[in-house]
Amino acid sequence: MKEKDDVKRAFSKNKEDYVKSSTHASGSDLSLLPVWLNPKSTMEVLDIATGGGHVAKRLAPFVKRVVATDITKAMLENTAAHLAAYSNIDYVIADAESLPFLDNTFEIITCRIAAHHFPNPKKFVSEVNRVLKPNGKFLFIDNIAAEQSDYGNFINTLEKMRDYSHVRSLRISEWKEIFNDNKLTFLKQQERKKTLPYDDWINRTLDMREDKESVTNFIKNATSDIHDYYDIKFKNDNIKSFTIDEWMILLEKK
C-alpha cells in the first residue's frame, strides 16, 4: 500500500530526528502515562508505532515487558540502539492494522502521535481490541482535527504538504465513533493545545527550500481566524511557532 510505503520511507530517513524531537520526546502527556495507566510489575504492554520509543521508555520501569512495534525497520533498529539499557523492551516490526499477536495478549496498549499516519483507523482500533485482554486499558494520544471543517481542513492540508506520509488527523467525534463501534469504554480524556517550534517542525521532514517556502506561504496566506485558532506566532515576518490540537484518552475493554 502506497501510504504505508510512504511512512517507511519518511521514518527511515528521519529516524534520528524522531528520537530527539522535542515534540515527541517531551510533553505533559508522557508524565501522565503511569498516573493514568497504573501499571504493575506483572503486566505486559504493547506500544504501537513506537517511533522514537518515548512511551516504551517511560513505561518500561513499571512493568514486566514492553513490546515496542513499528512498521519501519530502520526506525525500530535506531530506537532499540538508543534504549539498549532497557532490558525488558522487545522490538517487533509490525503493521498497526495487522498485529502479529494472539487475541487477548496485553494488559495495556498504547499508541502516541502516530495514528494520523494510518490509512485505516477502523482496522487499527479493531486490532487493538482483538489483542487487548478483557479489562485491559488502551491509552491513545494523537493530533486531531478541529470539529469546524475550515480549521480541520487547514491542518490536514498543512501536514500533508509538510509530510507526505501524513494520511489524516481525525476529529474527536470520528475517533469516538470508532471506539464505540469496538465497545471500548471511555474512562478519562484530555484535550490540549500543543506548541510546535516552527523550524524544528518543518526541518524534520523537508529538505528543499522550495517545499519549505510553499508550506510557509500556505500558513502566511491563511485567514486571520486560522492564525488565531492555531496561535501562529511571528517574529520579523518569520514564523516562530504555532499550536495544534492533541487529544489523550484512556479506554477499557470490557
Image (cartoon, grey):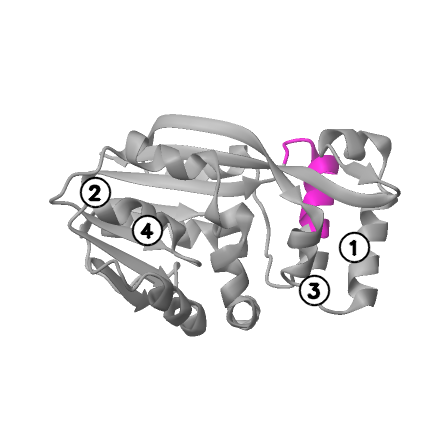
Residue at (79, 44) in percent of width and height: 239
**Residue type, numbered disc 3:** Leu
- Secondary structure of the residue carrying numbered label 3: loop
Rendering coords of residue 174 (x, y %) = 52, 38
Instruction: Give, as a single range, the part of the protein colored magenta.
Output: 146-158
Tell me the crowding category of disc 3: few under 14, some 14 to 19, or many 20 or more residues within 10 angstroms, Cα based: some
Of labels 2 and 4, earlier in sequence is 4
Residue holding disc 2: 62
Q: Quadrant of the C terminus?
A: top left
Q: Along the polypeptide, which appears first: circle 3 or circle 4?
A: 4
Residue at mark 3 to residue at mark 4: CA–CA distance: 28 Å
Circle nearer the N terminus (1, 3): 3
Q: Which mark is residue 57?
A: 4
* Disc ID at residue 215: 1
Image height of 138 relative to 191, above or below = below
Residue depicted at 81% across the width and 39% down the height:
234
